[in-house]
Image: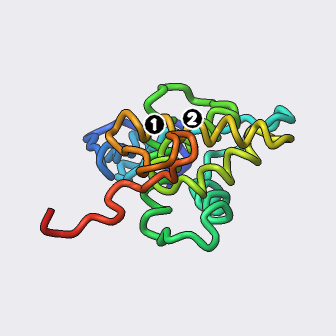
Amino acid sequence: MRCPFCHNPDSRVIDSREADEGATTRRRRSCPGCGRRFTTVEEAVLAVVKRSGVSEPFNRTKVVAGVRRACQGRPVDEDQLQLLAQQVEDAIRASGAAEVPSHEVGLAILRPLRELDEVAYLRFASVYRAFDSLEDFEKEITELRSRHLPAGTPPLPGLPPDLAPVRRRGAGRSPSS
């Protein structure tokens, strides 16, 4: 590490500590040339490789912006969007790769978005997976419905299971039940 004072290309690490819940490392350094001390902050860079082959740093703001469009008009607040973006970043960082294809970022968005809001999930999935027919939507809706039935959401009386509306978790329950 180059000394910021005398530009000596060498420095000695005196102390290292994790910061920001382990996301960064602070190092206290000493320059053997001028004897001055300075602090560096190191953060692992996560790069996203786009379809064009261009690599750019992961940007949580882009995740939030894309999901916000899918959530337009839905009961999703800014805190939920920020939490989703954090979950996406955590999932990508957990892979341990320094570079991830943009496709994997999209996949990492789908799971928490499905849990957050199914309509927003369907909107995002239709663009991300390039739905081009009603059958694509029907297949995805059938998959969403199948996730509810095993969880105990029964069909409405008098309706076959495939026509019963899907109830959101927690919908229609009173606080006392």
Q: Is residue 66 above or below residue 56?
A: below
Q: Is residue 120 left or right of residue 90?
A: right
Looking at the image, the residue that sits furthest to the front is: 158
Query: In front: 34, or 154?
Result: 154
Q: Is residue 176 above or below residue 130?
A: below
Residue 173 figure quarter: bottom left
Looking at the image, the residue that sits furthest to the left is: 176
Residue drawn where x is 70% and y is 40% of the image: 138
Mark 2 to mark 1 CA distance (whole Å): 7 Å
Residue 99 figure quarter: top right
Question: Residue 176 in the image: x percent, y percent?
Answer: 13, 68
Query: In front: 6, or 173?
Result: 173
| Pointer 2 residue | 143
The local secondary structure at tag 2 comes to helix
Q: Is residue 11 left or right of residue 57?
A: left
Mark 2 near mark 1, Cβ–Cβ under 8 Å? yes
Asked whether the viewer can see residue 164, the reply is yes
| Pointer 1 residue | 147
Amino acid type, residue under disc 1 in the picture: Arg
Query: In front: 65, or 9?
Result: 65
Residue 29 figure quarter: top left
